[in-house]
Amino acid sequence: MSELAARWAATRAAVDQACRAAGRAPSEVTLVAVSKLHPASAIDEVVGAGATDVGENYVQELLGKQASVTTAPRWHFIGRLQRNKARQIAGKVALIHAVDSLELAVELDQRATARQAILLAVNVADETTKSGIALADAPALVDAVAALPNLRLDGFMTLPPPDDDPTPHFAALRALRDRLATPARPLPHLSMGMSSDFASAIACGATLVRIGTAIFGARPTPA
């Protein structure tokens, strides 16, 4: 087994164990392998080892890797998306994790040729250095986005402050989803948790965990 395959297997096993510790089935949590700055060949290797979902942070990097891989994972765009690049991503990925404004949602809706699944990025900690909507603004934005015909709102994502206990932030996002979900609008997904805190996220209800370093190793230094 290669080092990458071993890293993938160990990470998947750790996620499964966190699910069982939380009283959840491992099938409830999708492990998104974040390949930021790693080559397309590394994606092929990890997919060959069993990964099904791959996340990228940058538009041009994602498009380049899509053209280079020999495998066919489900692609996730997990970085901040600028409105002027929405046309390049709409319809190219299974899920866009970080829609942070109605303006961006409208742009994606206009560019999508089929229903594009998205999550709303919520700035739970109200950090001035991060994008994302405030908790208080989420209900109105959920209603507005749900009315756009070419988008499917699947839930929320968040990224807690690196020096905070992540659990209260994850719990707040779960509470927001539970409050706003309806039978007609179930909002099934919570994208939260990375290499250092996925166990806490899973205990709080994460359905998608975004893990890069634990799988691919340290990121290469950009050229």
Image (tube, helix red, strand yellow):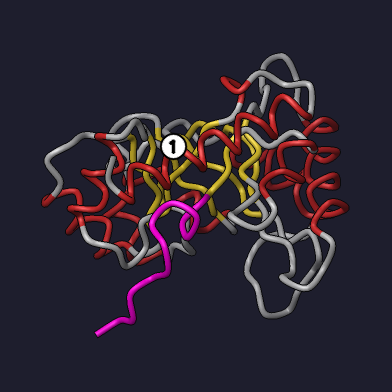
Q: Nearer the viewer, residue 213 or 40?
A: 213
Q: Is residue 170 left or right of residue 103?
A: right
Q: Which residues are magenta?
A: 211-223
Q: Is residue 67 left or right of residue 125?
A: left
Residue 115 is at least partly visible in this image: yes
Q: Residue furthest bottom?
A: 223
Q: Is 189 included in the stretch rendered in magenta?
A: no
Q: Residue at x 79, y 68 (%)?
A: 126
Q: Position of residue 134 (x, y in %)?
A: 77, 60
Q: Nearer the viewer, residue 95 or 198?
A: 198
Q: Residue furthest front?
A: 1
Element marked by disc 1: helix
Binning the other alpha carbons within 10 Å of mark 1 as few (below 14), some (14 to 19) or many (20 upward) gives: some
Q: Position of residue 100 (x, y in %)?
A: 59, 58
Q: Position of residue 31 (x, y in %)?
A: 50, 38
Q: Residue at x 75, y 49 (%)?
A: 138
Q: Position of residue 221 (x, y in %)?
A: 33, 81
Q: Is residue 195 above or below residue 90?
A: below
Q: Main secondary structure of the magenta part?
A: loop
Q: Is residue 43 above or below residue 1?
A: below
Going by the numbered disc 1, the residue's amino acid type is Ala
Q: Nearer the viewer, residue 120 or 209?
A: 209
- The residue where tag 1 is placed is 9
Q: Nearer the viewer, residue 39 or 154?
A: 39
State which quarter of the image contains the C terminus. bottom left
Residue 146 is at least partly visible in this image: no
